[in-house]
Image: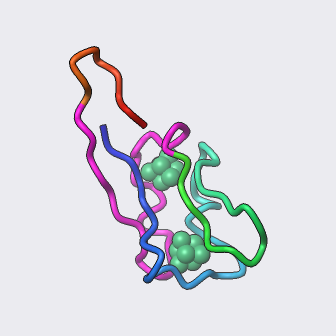
Amino acid sequence: MKRALIEADKCLNCKICTAAESCQRSAIFRECDDEKPWVDFYKCTGCMKCKNSCKGKAIMFITQPCSMSGRSSW
Ligand code: SF4
Ligand code: SF4
């Protein structure tokens, strides 16, 4: 299973997060207006649409194998 992850040191904390705007699952969001965004792994499907929309090239992807029960831990 693949999920998007925002690298905090690369994120420019743009006033308007174009990566979040490109996400049809609303998986990228901010807790507060002045905080950097983060990805909700339970909403993210790993579609990669946000990657090219990010102005800071801060989106990376991580892969998590399924457990023996077929469930992921995120
Ligand atoms: S577009 Fe990219 S660099 Fe800008 S706030 Fe969103 S995740 Fe950070
Ligand atoms: S990979 Fe897809 S679902 Fe996940 S945050 Fe990016 S655009 Fe949204």
Establish if 5 lies above or below 72.
Answer: below
Residue at far top of view:
69
User: Does the stretch in magenta take in 32?
Assistant: no
Image coloring type: rainbow
Q: Is residue 74 left or right of residue 29?
A: left
Residue 17 falls in which quadrant of the image? bottom right
Q: Which residue: 28% across, 14% down?
A: 69
Residue 52 falls in which quadrant of the image? bottom left
Query: 29 or 22, which is in the foreground?
Result: 29
Q: Is residue 40 left or right of residue 29?
A: left
On-image quarter of the C terminus: top left
On the image, the x and y values in percent for residue 15 come to 71, 81
Establish if 52 lies above or below 50.
Answer: below
On the image, the x and y values in percent for residue 54 come to 49, 73
Q: Which residue: 48% across, 75% down?
A: 8
On the image, the x and y values in percent for residue 21 come to 64, 61
Residue interval drawn in magenta: 41-65
Q: Which residue: 61% across, 66% down?
A: 37
Give the number of marks.
0
On-image quarter of the N terminus: top left
Establish if 67 lies above or below 9.
Answer: above
Magenta span: helix, strand or loop, mainly?
Answer: loop
Q: Is residue 48 left or right of residue 19?
A: left
User: Does the stretch in magenta take in 43?
Assistant: yes
